Amino acid sequence: MDITRETIESFLFHEADLLDEFAVEEWLALWTPDACYWVPCNGRAGGDPTREVSLIYDDYARLQDRVWRLASPAAHSQRPRSRMRRVVGNIRFELREGELHTRSNFLLAELRRGRQEIWSGVCQHRLLASGDNFQIKAKTVLLTQSDEAIDNLSFLL
Amino acid sequence: MNAPQALSDYAHLVQTDRIHGSIYTDPAIFEQEMARIFHRGWLCLGHEAEIPQPGDFRATTLGRQPVLMVRGDDGQVRVFMNRCRHRGMTLCEDETGNEKFLRCWYHGWVYRNTGELEDVPLANAYGAQFRREDFGLTPVPRMESYRGFVFASLAPTGQSLLEHLGLARRYLDIFLDASPTGEIDVTAGVHRTRYRGNWKFVGMDGYHPHYTHRSVMDSWKRRPGGGMANLHHGDPFCDESGNLTRDAGNGHVLLDMFPSRLAHVDEYLAGIRKRPGGEDYIAAMQEAHGPQRARELLAWAGDPHVGIYPNLQLIGIQIRIIRPLAVDDTEVLMFPALLKDVPPSINEMRLRQHESFYGPAGAGAPDDAEIFERNQQGLGATVEPWVYLARGLERERQDTDGSIIGMPGDETTQRGQLREWKRMMSEA
């Protein structure tokens, strides 16, 4: 498939919709089996997750656990679900050794049980072109709030 | 049920089998908790391994009061009130960092990281009586540490830290002695979480996992060995597990999961052996502690699951500090401790295990926060104001060391914490 700004935007917007709509199984299907889904903590972008704590550092098995749990009726922190809408922008991209590296900003309004939170950050995707679509090999979310006290980050970024 | 009498009548509010809901909701009671518990007793500020280098500091709080835990150039860890001696500014703009000098940016007073006042700009205007040595940073009235755990108290006198820790001291040892050298590294960062509920909800509760954490316990069956299932084999919270709730006195309580961990230690060790260097870790533990003690310590996995009253818990790999912000607002800091002198794969395993359950994006902690918030809301219904804590009261018994033990889901732990709460709150 062609790697153009339009196809890249279309993929990132599609992913954002899946996340906002809690289409978690469909979202999981975007990932490659060597997935790395990383949300660093304490503002430590570029740190070493083998010896520093992260908010999320999932391989494919842990990502499956996460998605599976969210479907449980006993995932209380998502009962009721967060209502979300995010805007993705400032997209930049480059091809590196057969992988497409993108960097985008997001702004997410999340409403749950009477409280609205505004989340923001930078997403770094490593994508593989596959057939008519892209697959996510790695996604790192540099959350602006990563060093603040957070009560509930149980939805997907 | 009788209506509560005066709010200060703590013997009425905290009875053996029930407590009055107002202790979680009444701002006046919260004020008294700050004065009588958090601004009087021993509080844990953290561990010295958070600030390993000379000049490393952490700005934190002792109850409501800002303090600085700092390692001086002489290597010694001190705790100062975080307040410039001139006009009272806090000194460090960052929560953590490394500074040779602590500077007040209001009028430029500068302190050494050992507390002495180093420089006052244009000091000649203060006259001949002004002596810099009278204006060093104010030390916290009392500070003691136990194997690097730093405790402080705003009360100049009172029981010693060892008296306060009492029987619970051995659980601090169990946390540290998961390392063959008994040392930890607390520079891996912190999970900061917060919930809109009373601080006392962060209890030590063996009854809630089957319900609050049902999704997690179901996931253990789905993927044995994944996440926290690496640590738990079978259901550690059922009566048949052999596990206990334990009230070690002075408000210190634990979910004592040693019986089931010891019964399954070979499965746990098989998991460790599969990791690079796992065999070396086990051998180093045996070398350091002897085969019998090493087996016990490995079974504990460094997880005493203990609450040291009122603001410290050692759960999994984390040093958890509880910060009450208001009667219905609480911050919980979770510092994962790495083990020193072990293969990197052991620490990596511990970090992933921690993240799987704890922190704001874990599978467990956000559900706890959600339940605590619903608990706070529910207590707003005051027609029947009592909270019932009688579970296991008839069957609890005294262990040989003097602690009180109950079955895994018994409310022995809550009763132990609230007995200490009542004692501290009743002391004028």
Image (cartoon, coloured by chain):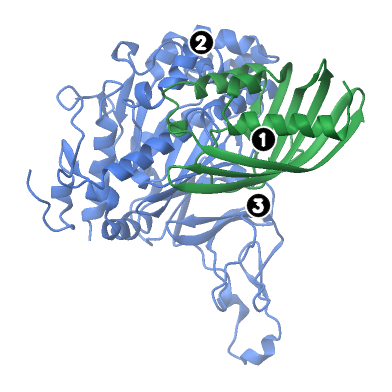
Residue ID for mark 3: B75
Left or right of B251 in this view: B356? right
User: What is the crowding at mark 2: few (fewer than 14 residues within 10 Å), some, or many (at least 20)?
Assistant: few
The total of numbered circles placed on residues is 3
Expressed as whole percent of the image width and height from the top left, the position of residue A124 reads: 77, 35
| Secondary element type, mark 3 | loop
Expressed as whole percent of the image width and height from the top left, the position of residue B20 reads: 19, 46
Residue ID for mark 2: B222
Residue B244 versus residue B105 in the image, above or below: above
| Secondary element type, mark 2 | helix
Furthest-left residue in this view = B2
Nearer the observer, B83 or A110: A110
Q: Are marks 1 and 3 on the same chain?
A: no
Question: Judging from the image, what is the letter of the chain drawn in green?
Answer: A
Three-letter amino acid code at disc 2?
Arg
Question: Judging from the image, what is the letter of the chain drawn in blue?
Answer: B
> Looking at the rendering, in which quadrant would you find the C terminus of chain A?
top right
| Secondary element type, mark 1 | strand
Nearer the observer, A156 or B198: A156
Expressed as whole percent of the image width and height from the top left, the position of residue A46 reads: 77, 38
- The span from disc 2 to disc 3 (Cα, nearest Å) is 49 Å
Asked which quadrant contains residue B155, the reply is bottom left
> Looking at the rendering, in which quadrant would you find the N terminus of chain A?
top right
Nearer the observer, B96 or B332: B332
Q: Nearer the viewer, mark 2 or mark 3?
A: 2
The numbered mark, 2 or 3, whose residue comes first in the sequence reads 3
